[in-house]
Amino acid sequence: MLSYQHGFHAGNLADVQKHALLCVALDYLTQKDKPLSYIETHAGRGLYDLGGDMALKTGEAAGGILRLEEAFGADHPYRRRLAEVRVQYGEKAYPGSPMLAALSLRETDTMHLAELHPQEHGALNYAMGPWGPHIQQRDGMEMALAVTPPTPRRGLMLIDPSWEVKEDYVSIPKAMGQIARKWNVGILMLWYPILQSGAHVAMLRVLEQAFPEALRHEVRFPSVREGHGMLGSGMFVVNAPWGLAEEADRISGIFKRLG
């Protein structure tokens, strides 16, 4: 599916949950003096303009990061990354997960990114050029299966599809099982929407049967506009690193204050 462009949704409430957890996980992993691999299956363009036409058309960032940023302490890894991006790219800049990861990683670490959309792939190459990651214009799950187990073996994979392709609710859990068998030490972080239609429910049953010890974290929030079927945001984390469950609880508290 080549229609989805995250620029309309960058910095929304789902991004806040996902990116805060990602930054905390990477902050923990990089405290150890051992190299790691970062793999992202649906990378987007890497950098977004919250003052641009796409973001202003939906207004989702206004109700997302622009509303909740100060709920995170100034020393929180997410806040630190946001500050770094604004210094370099301006106050309206918002980093996608590839840039958040790049700012968190070290020279000894390795990045593998996939993005299928031609325009998004081109923008990703431009935005991520300074860090020199491995970028492929390819189906993200195909890339993930091809590069696992990665070198270094220690690492994290973010799986963040648009979910426009309904078959993903079946194929992605299956692929995660294959990846986990090849890379049993890898941290797998899957983002999914909580939908009024309930399309995610059967997928979660399959995932919880396959990974009974995984961390499942969900936040609910008001619909961004009338008729929008997304009621919240979820993260399913296999081999969750130390401290991530506690961070998830803190994020839940932040979202509960939204009303």
Image (tube, helix red, strand yellow):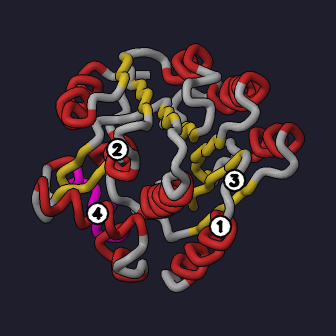
Q: Residue at x 76, y 33 (%)?
A: 184
Q: Nearer the viewer, mark 4 or mark 1?
A: 1
Q: Disc 4 designates what residue? A: 82
Q: Is residue 87 above or below residue 139?
A: below
Any part of residue 229 in sight: no
Q: In front here: 177 or 106?
A: 106
Residue 61 image position (x, y, % from top left): 30, 63
Q: Which mark is residue 243?
A: 1
Q: Disc 2 designates what residue? A: 102
Numbered disc 1: secondary structure: loop
Q: What amino acid is labelled 2 in the image?
A: Ala
N-terminal of the two: label 4 or label 2? 4
Query: Quarter of the image holding residue 226?
Result: bottom left
Q: Which mark is residue 240?
A: 3
N-terminal of the two: label 3 or label 4? 4
Residue 57 image position (x, y, % from top left): 22, 54
Count residues near mark 1 (Cα–Cα under 10 Å), then give few for <14, some for 14-19, many for 20+. few
Any part of residue 5 in sight: yes
Is the magenta region chiefly helix, strand or loop? Answer: loop
User: Rounded to the nearest whole Å, what is the CA distance between mark 3 and mark 4?
Assistant: 23 Å
Numbered disc 2: secondary structure: helix
